[in-house]
Image (tube, coloured by chain):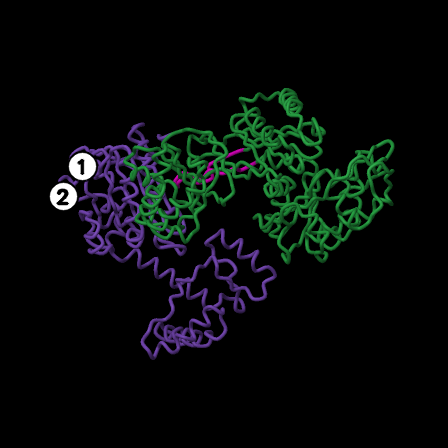
Amino acid sequence: MNEQDLRKMVEQMVEQMVSKDTSSTSTSYESNSRSSVASMVSGECLPDITKIDLRKQFLVDDAKDKEGYLAMKAKTPARLGVGRAGARYKTISMLRVRADHAAAQDAVFSDVSEEFIKKNNFVAVKTLCTDKDEYLTRPDLGRRFSPEEIEVIKKTCGQNPKVLIIVGDGLSSSAIEANVEDMIPAIKQGLSMHSINVPPILFIKYARVGAMDDIGQITDADVICMLVGERPGLVTAESMSAYIAYKPKHGLAEAKRTVISNIHKGGTTAVEAGAHAAELIKKMLDKKASGIDLK
Amino acid sequence: MREELLSVGIDIGTSTTQLVFSKLYIENMASSYSVPRIVIVDKEIIYRSEIYFTPLKTPTEIDGPRVRQIIEQEYEKAGISKSGIDTGAVIITGETARKENAKEVLEFLSGFAGDFVVATAGPDLESIIAGKGAGAHAYSKEHSTSVVNIDVGGGTSNLALFLRGEVVDTGCLDIGGRLIKINPSTHEITYLSKKVEKLIAKHNLNIHIGMVATKENLDPIVKVMIKGLKQSVGLAEIDEDYEIMITNKSIAPNQKIENISFSGGVADYIYHEREGKEYFAYGDMGVLLGEAIRQSELCTQLHLVKSVETIRATVVGAGAHTTEISGSTITYTSNPFPIKNLPILKMRIEEEENIDTLSEALQKKLDWFKLEGNLQRVAIAIEGIKNPSFVQVSDYAKGLVKGLQELISRELPLIIIVEYDMAKALGQAMYHELQFQKDVICLDSIKLDNGDYIDIGKPVAEGTVLPVVVKTLVFNE
């Protein structure tokens, strides 16, 4: 069997499976899909299965203690209690995994939109990478800037600023769009309690965390707080981290960065992370240290 | 990174007064690349006092100096000084809470026992504390089930229903071992409580002060009490007798109850045979009541769970299960702690809708806390939003600052308690809104209701979190 035959066969199987299984999956999906039959004609969209809260979805038939199971499920994003069809997942579980995987891939391969950058008054710069493929295959290039970009950085941030907030797309553009608008004002507000103001915010395309070291080298900032999209997973594609370091320079040991990770709707909320980051920044300025040196 | 808090629990009950010391261990459970999450990871009872009869000066007055003496003595025996106490609670329970000087004694003791030892009273809180001390709370969580704990003490039976580690409901009945007191040597009845007298009259029972009690002649009144307990957990039809026996409220009927556990002094005779113990050896009807419960349908119709504490459940609960830890991302711009006995003004979720609804509702409700026109100290409790945007947080801050102008102008402390995790950002936003001119205390991850009080202790875990006790202060007249 050559590849084309195989593909055809799989396509047929998937088609059959989807049309057959709409009648035998969970009730919530059943009612959704029934309306979708009509929607094909009307041109509406299929119901978005990624909108279903997995912690509340329960697909086990004839469970002995459904409420007890749901109480446990509320504590984990793991796909538990999904039931089975024979030895396999139910269709809705299978489709959901694929949908979540697709969202994760989109988060990596899409760009933070121009409008978003403009709306937030970010100053856009780019690392030495020329496209996504190069960004993914050459981490070293994602940490350095060209002479032209260095001029922009110098002009934006000035020399020896006390605190810089910078944003990098990293491995999830969705994470940036979902969180920075709530996190940055929270950081700024927290810093204003200590009369600290920050220069305009840089947005770095094709950014690795190490890009903050180059910016530290260029500007000699006391503290840099870099918000960067985390590698997406199946739980969420919108998770962001804040990497904060005191006087970052080329060759900075990773242990000298302080990290707040898992900033997303189901994790640490962006506003609280921002308020916490502001306090960390203040502490770093006082103690002149970051990462494991900050005790 | 593990930190220890030394906690004291003191229970002044209808029949007994006790004390325990326990250690609470707190730890940051979050990984080092995350915001901190400080929680109580373990609790350990390190000292249990003797069990004393609660000293009374007169039938309606607690002997305060004698109680104080007992406590001083036990501190000394345990080798613990007042200054070493980090937290804890004094609870005044059962009929003792209805004594004339209950409030004074309680307030005095909480100050006497340590800087942050809080005063608590109230039948609902008592039920919860006893249930937690008895281990019903932990059992329901561990086995993912429902457990009702009945703390059968001297004056009252306190019910707490737990479902998977959450308190579902509480109730309190005037059923207890010392509602009838009996001379241990002559077996003469020396005291009948008012409610017992009422039940005796209603049923024309031949029981009166001065007569010699036997198992047989007390049997009818014991039966009424057993019926009351059965009614409380849905094993018998509700009737007029039950209405008489209810202290303030019972647990709502028709709830699914799978397991039952007992605590309180009477519980020892529910879990264990009397083994030749004289029925009236304690000078009351407790042994008789315990044995009757043991033989009743309460222990066969429901699955009987062994409690971890019996007579000490309430004091262990007060010592080990009252202190909570606030959320780990909070704001406090000054350190006036400990703050004690703060009443709660809880907003309804509809009132939190926008700046105007919040500020207007606040202005109106602050009037409730005026005494002769003077605004008293009060903490504002709100629910908040699960994943708030920065704009939403700012709106909350504006609404709160606007609505609390009177509190601010009178220089009363500004204390906000949010249920959802948003206190750090909200506190900072309020401080910003106040131009950094007025101190703000903003905590989260604590659920409160109108009628509750909150006590806030000195910061722990390098200032990250504040120990908190949520409680009631109800003295029945």
What amino acid does circle 2 point to? Val
With respect to residue B468, does B382 lie above or below? below
Image quarter in which the C terminus of chain B is found? top right
Q: Position of residue A15 (x, y in %)?
A: 40, 75
* Residue receiving disc 1: A218
* Mark pair 2, 1: CA separation: 11 Å
Q: Colour of chain B?
A: green
What chain does mark 1 sit on?
A
Residue at left offset 35%, top offset 30%: A293
Residue at left offset 66%, top offset 29%: B62
* Residue B110: assigned label: none
Q: Position of residue B257 (x, y in %)?
A: 65, 54
Question: Where, by quadrant of the figure, is residue A234 drawn?
Answer: bottom left
Q: Secondary structure at mark 2?
A: helix
Q: Residues within 10 Å of mark 2 (few under 14, many from 20)?
A: some
* Residue receiving disc 2: A152
Q: What range of the chain is rendered magenta?
A: B25-42
With respect to residue B27, does A50 lie above or below? below
Mark nearer the N terminus (2 vs 1): 2
Q: Secondary structure at mark 1?
A: helix
Can residue B31 be seen from the camera position used here?
Answer: no
Residue at left offset 37%, top offset 75%: A8
The letter of the purple chain is A
Q: Is residue B124 left or right of residue B186?
A: left
Work out whether residue A142 or residue B327 is closer to the camera in this orientation and state it: B327
The residue most toward the front is B372
Q: Residues within 10 Å of mark 1 (few under 14, many from 20)?
A: many
Question: Where, by quadrant of the figure, is residue B52 drawn?
Answer: top right
Q: How many marks?
A: 2
Q: Nearer the viewer, mark 2 or mark 1?
A: 2
What amino acid does circle 1 point to? Ile
